[in-house]
Amino acid sequence: MKIALIQQKSYKIKQATIDKTVGYIQKASKNGAELIVLQELHQTEYFCQSEDTKFFEYASSWQDDIKFWSSIAKKYNIVLVTSLFEERTAGLYHNTAVVFDRDGSVAGKYRKMHIPDDPAFYEKFYFTEGDLGFEPIDTSIGRLGVLICWDQWYPEGARLMTLKGAEILIYPTAIGWFDEDSVEEKNRQLDSWITIQRSHAIANGVPVVSCNRVGFEKDSSEVLDGIRFWGNSFVCDPQGELIAHANHQEEIILYATIDKQRTKEVRNIWPFLRDRRIDRYGDLVKRYCD
Amino acid sequence: MKIALIQQKSYKIKQATIDKTVGYIQKASKNGAELIVLQELHQTEYFCQSEDTKFFEYASSWQDDIKFWSSIAKKYNIVLVTSLFEERTAGLYHNTAVVFDRDGSVAGKYRKMHIPDDPAFYEKFYFTEGDLGFEPIDTSIGRLGVLICWDQWYPEGARLMTLKGAEILIYPTAIGWFDEDSVEEKNRQLDSWITIQRSHAIANGVPVVSCNRVGFEKDSSEVLDGIRFWGNSFVCDPQGELIAHANHQEEIILYATIDKQRTKEVRNIWPFLRDRRIDRYGDLVKRYCD
């Protein structure tokens, strides 16, 4: 199965950004991609760099956004993983991945479960934590374990998706560097980010797909300079081996071929699911054991 | 805090192997190591390559082994992590790490919780799965999260040790290649093994210490050729960065300096423990959600 990840920049106008994305989708589908994954909050700039109620306006198009991306999935006959700003009701918003099947139907949605809150990543202001749990989404090309960005640091999310039959783990994401950090610190952060996601592939024997934003986006509040999104979108196989890897500065359609049979081979060699000590995992639902 | 890992070969005679180990301990303590970690089942060859009741004899010295390593810890004034074959009663054995404090006292023990069973790693024949749970061990130099080999593939074990306050995760281990595998497969296996353990450091914000066996050991049953233990013992910091890394073929004392303060810095930058969705982790205690 051929898949494509669209790693792209944000253009200042939403429509300009969407036009770019659709152009890439058209190209990727022409090149045979059956599954296309977009980056986190791909319709706009990463607005969570500051806390400003004006940005809730971006969620007002939620219903129209769904209609639009549905039409794109249908037009290009692809399974499409989008990442949208969900307005559930006034004052209640989610960071939500909506997955469309080839016929344009909504295959399912996932509301980001782990919400970060760091300088320039003020997501707890914008997004209520997801209440749909860690539930994979069934599509015509397989059962997809869609998670979002900060979720990628949590082995629990990846494991739960696997236990529920996810055949691929997919992370739309938006992560980057601050220019003032040292080269060493930047390398450490990027390497940690790749490593933790590859580890989910290894621990669970499933391929992992991570689609990240690229390019510099200024902090509109001017408190900080801005974020240089580090790209590096990648796909790894069920043993954690990188099979496709984008660079850190350019828009790109990253293609990969997923061999679903490989999961079975890898899990038969390394049967980690066989030996989990579920009788002694009870404390995992505690905040801390003090 | 200076630590040392002793990556070594097995010599055919137990006493010869132990003499080598003690020589390395003497040297490492002279060089200032306060914590010394030995590899899995360091007293003998890796006997689990075949299933033979004669090897249970190796566990008959369990009480004497404890006395001996206690005397070594005391003599060299070190905290010592050993990995022994525990005879609990006739027909009931464990793969057990015993940790000694500087005064020679037993600080605690950990019975391997996840037991593998693969061709040439027939551990389910020899070892009952541990029943002490994932409990860190308090010592004069800190609270140690000691786990063993196959445990290293399980994010659950690392997380539980962290939730119980472990300051360092320590894996005595014995893993290697089969010579008939391709170079590519060997590289994938080694890289996966390093990656999954580095991920435990990243997910939990703790340093990870992994001490592996090295050298070729023939399969005494002659069913398979044998295992070429891949060495590569390493230490990584709480961000997953490798700070010490041994090669794949030589005996070595691998030194590293652990900065316990670094955990706090890293966790304050990346506060993953803050955002765990413990309200939705309940299914982690299920074998599979079907």
Image (cartoon, coloured by chain):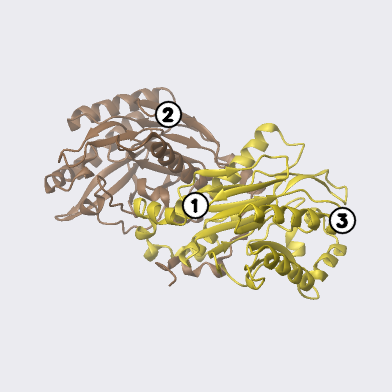
Chain colours: A yellow, B brown
Residue B246 as seen in the image, left or right of residue A14: left
Residue picked out by circle 2: B246
Q: Residue at x 76, y 50 (%)?
A: A119
User: Mark 3 falls on what kind of element?
Assistant: loop
Residue B209, given in percent of the width and then of the height, sits at 44, 39
User: Mark 2 falls on what kind of element?
Assistant: loop
Residue A138, given in percent of the width and then of the height, sits at 55, 69
User: Quick check: B131 above or below B229?
Assistant: below
Query: Quick one: which residue is furthest to the front in this view?
Result: A30
Q: Residues within 10 Å of mark 2 (few under 14, many from 20)?
A: many
Q: Residues within 10 Å of mark 1 (few under 14, many from 20)?
A: many
In space, the residues marked 1 and 3 are separated at their CA atoms by 36 Å
Residue A97 as seen in the image, left or right of residue B32: right
Q: Chain of mark 3?
A: A
Residue picked out by circle 1: A201
In space, the residues marked 2 and 3 are separated at their CA atoms by 52 Å
Residue A155 as seen in the image, left or right of residue B51: right
Q: Residue at x 39, y 43 (%)?
A: B171
Residue picked out by circle 3: A13
User: Mark 1 falls on what kind of element?
Assistant: helix
| Amino acid carrying mark 1 in the image | Ala
Q: Residues within 10 Å of mark 3 (few under 14, many from 20)?
A: few
Q: Chain of mark 1?
A: A
Q: Chain of mark 2?
A: B
